[in-house]
Image (cartoon, rainbow, N blue to C red):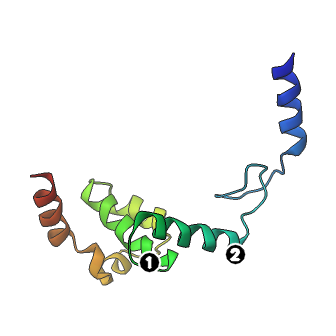
Amino acid sequence: MVHDALNLLAVQMWNEGDWLFATPTGTPINPRTDYSEWKRLLSAAGVRDARLHDARHPVATVLLILGVPEQAVMKIMGWSRSAMGRASPACGRPRSMDIATASAS
C-alpha cells in the first residue's frame, strides 16, 4: 500500500523531458548548480581546479584505452570527425597505452 502511494507520488512529481542529465524530478539541471557541484567535487578530491569541459579529454582517452571503437567514442564525445580526437594531446593512443600499461604494473 505504501509502495503504491510512493510510486503514484513519484509519477505525479516527474517532469518528462529529453534530458541526458536531470534532477531527481526530471527537470533540467541548473547550470549554476552543476558548476558549483563540479567545483565542490574537485575540492573534495584534492585535485587542481579545472573547467568541467576539461574533463572531456581524459574521458575520451580512457574510452580509447579500454578499446571502445573510435566511432563510438566520437558519438559519445559529440565529435563529427575523428580528427577532433587526434587533435587533442590527451587522446594520443600510443602515449595513453604506455601510461595504461605502466599503471597496471
Q: Which sits earlier in the primary sequence, circle 2 or circle 1?
A: 2
Q: Is residue 44 left or right of residue 85?
A: right
- Along the line of sight, the residue nearer the viewer: 72 or 96: 96
Tell me which amino acid carries mark 2. Answer: Arg
Which quadrant of the figure has residue 97?
A: bottom left
Image quarter hosting the N terminus: top right
Q: In this view, does 102 lie to the left or right of 50?
A: left
Q: Is residue 95 left or right of residue 23?
A: left
Mark 2 element type: helix
Q: In this view, does 25 lie above or below 62?
A: above
The residue under the point 73% across, 69% down is 30
The residue under the point 46% across, 73% down is 79
Question: Where does label 2 land, which residue?
Answer: 32
Tell me which amino acid carries mark 1. Answer: Asp
Q: Is residue 35 left or right of residue 19?
A: left
From the top left corner, tell me how far across and down residue 43 is, in percent.
47, 70
From the top left corner, tell me how far across and down residue 87 is, in percent.
32, 84
From the top left corner, tell me how far across and down residue 16 is, in percent.
81, 50
- Along the line of sight, the residue nearer the viewer: 77 or 46: 46
- Along the line of sight, the residue nearer the viewer: 49 or 6: 49
- Along the line of sight, the residue nearer the viewer: 4 or 37: 37
Which quadrant of the figure has residue 63?
A: bottom left
Q: Nearer the viewer, mark 2 or mark 1?
A: 2
Measure the alpha-carbon separation of dots 2 and 1.
17 Å
Which quadrant of the figure has residue 74?
A: bottom left
Mark 1 element type: helix
Dot 1: few (<14), some (14–19), or many (≥20) neighbours within 10 Å? few
Question: Where does label 1 land, which residue?
Answer: 54
The residue under the point 16% across, 65% down is 99
From the top left corner, tell me how far across and down residue 95 is, in percent.
16, 72
Dot 2: few (<14), some (14–19), or many (≥20) neighbours within 10 Å? few
